[in-house]
Image: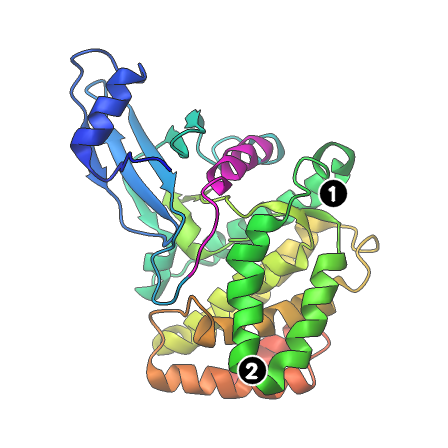
């Protein structure tokens, strides 16, 4: 087990010098970054003006309940960045700088300032439909182009162990254990998800993993990327738009409009759905599964109030008994229950 803690500036400076990532005598500024629960993350600023973000995977995640995952996942993230760089327009993901298998580190270019975290913008009521459309096009492009390159990518990303430990167990299995009446729904969805092998799945496609720079979205955090069911990404991301529609009461109509637009642009970006039989009903079920998981799973949405959690739980459990057939139907039903 590594003893290096990159959130300790003195330790990180010694490491960077010893491994020749910075010049002898070069003084860098190191700033710990808040954010995700699964990594230590710091900003390193060099005298030249170059800036890096360095991530170090944690074995025990920073959440209220015990949640463990191998730190080897940081190297899956590095592979994900390289794959996504080939699928997406330049600048859509940061450029990798170096990777360290001994200390489970990944360094990449920092997104230039000024930038803003999209989740923070949305919670502040700063919602622009153009950003929603970019969000949809990025995801649709990942799914379509990876499916087109499936002979190259499927085997490289076939290991789903990090998806199991960081998504299916904490979001689906754990949530099912909290709601006996939902257990058949989750059991069927878990079996269905594990049976799909269609495209590259980001697995953490969320506004918290988007930075907005010069009005353009940059995608971060790729440690659960794998080959599997792209409908998971749609359900996971849809949950954030719908949950924020519940929470940001003053902007509920535009959040609902944004959710509708998100699906429309995604469909246009993917194009031919005939290859993905049953995709939309699965996306509906993944959305319901994630809506409940973000209330009662291992990683609940911190911004929902007790009343908002209660209402989201009740509506989602009711819909699990008879899921809507399409995502537009789910959006409207959810909107009516706000």
Of residues 119 and 43, which is closer to you in this image? 43
Q: Is residue 85 visible?
A: yes
Q: Which quadrant would residue 146 be assigned to in this image?
A: top right
Vertical arrangement, residue 51 with respect to residue 199, above or below: above
Vertical arrangement, residue 328 with respect to residue 268, above or below: below
Label located before the other in sequence (2 or 1): 1
- Tell me the SS state at disc 1: helix
Give the class, few, some or many, for how many residues have Cα within 10 Å of label 1's Cα (few <14, many ≥20): many
Write the residue at 52% across / 71% down. Answer: 174
Left/right of residue 291 with respect to residue 53 in the rendered view: right
Looking at the image, how many numbered discs can be counted on the residues? 2
What residue does disc 1 label? Answer: 147
Q: Which quadrant would residue 12 be assigned to in this image?
A: top left
Residue 149: say if magenta.
Answer: no
Of residues 274 and 169, which is closer to you in this image? 169
Of residues 317 and 162, which is closer to you in this image? 162
Write the residue at 50% across / 44% down. Answer: 223
- What are the residue bounds of the magenta stretch? 67-83
Residue 234 at what x, y percent from top left? Answer: 61, 60
Of residues 274 and 108, which is closer to you in this image? 108
What residue does disc 2 label? Answer: 316
Left/right of residue 204 with respect to residue 211 in the rendered view: right
Q: Name the chief secondary structure element in magenta.
A: helix
Name, please, the residue furthest toward the front.
Answer: 1
- Tell me the SS state at disc 2: helix
Give the class, few, some or many, for how many residues have Cα within 10 Å of label 2's Cα (few <14, many ≥20): many
Left/right of residue 50 with respect to residue 220 in the rendered view: left
Residue 248 at what x, y percent from top left? Answer: 36, 74
Residue 128 at what x, y percent from top left? Answer: 42, 58
């Amino acid at each position: 087990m590594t003893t290096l803690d990159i959130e300790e500036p003195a330790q990180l400076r010694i490491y960077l010098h010893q491994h020749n990532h910075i010049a002898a005598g070069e003084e860098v500024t190191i700033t710990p970054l808040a954010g995700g629960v699964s990594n230590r993350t710091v900003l390193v600023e060099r005298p030249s003006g170059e800036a890096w973000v360095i991530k170090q995977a944690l074995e025990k995640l920073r959440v209220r309940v015990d949640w463990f995952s191998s730190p080897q996942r940081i190297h899956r993230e590095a592979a994900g960045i390289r794959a996504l760089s080939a699928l997406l327009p330049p600048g859509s993901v940061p450029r990798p700088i170096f990777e360290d298998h001994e200390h489970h580190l990944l360094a990449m270019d920092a997104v230039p300032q000024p930038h803003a975290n999209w989740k923070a913008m949305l919670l502040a009521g700063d919602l622009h439909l153009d950003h929603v459309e970019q969000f949809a096009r990025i995801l649709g492009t990942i799914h379509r182009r990876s499916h087109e390159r499936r002979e190259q990518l499927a085997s490289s990303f076939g290991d789903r162990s990090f998806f199991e430990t960081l998504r299916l167990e904490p979001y689906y299995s754990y949530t099912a254990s909290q709601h006996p009446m939902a257990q058949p729904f989750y059991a069927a969805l878990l079996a269905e998800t594990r049976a799909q092998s269609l495209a590259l799945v980001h697995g953490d496609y969320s506004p918290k993993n988007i930075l907005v720079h010069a009005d353009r979205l940059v995608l971060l955090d790729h440690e659960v990327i794998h080959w599997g069911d792209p409908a998971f990404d749609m359900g996971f991301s849809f949950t954030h738009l719908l949950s924020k529609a519940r929470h940001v009461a003053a902007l509920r109509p535009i959040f609902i409009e944004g959710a509708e637009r998100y699906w429309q642009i995604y469909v246009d970006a993917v194009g031919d759905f005939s290859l993905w039989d049953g995709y939309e009903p699965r996306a509906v079920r993944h959305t319901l599964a994630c809506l409940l998981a973000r209330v009662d799973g291992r990683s609940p949405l911190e911004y929902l109030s007790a009343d908002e959690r209660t209402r989201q739980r009740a509506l989602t459990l009711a819909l699990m008994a008879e899921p809507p057939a399409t995502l537009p139907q789910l959006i409207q039903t959810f909107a009516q229950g706000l």
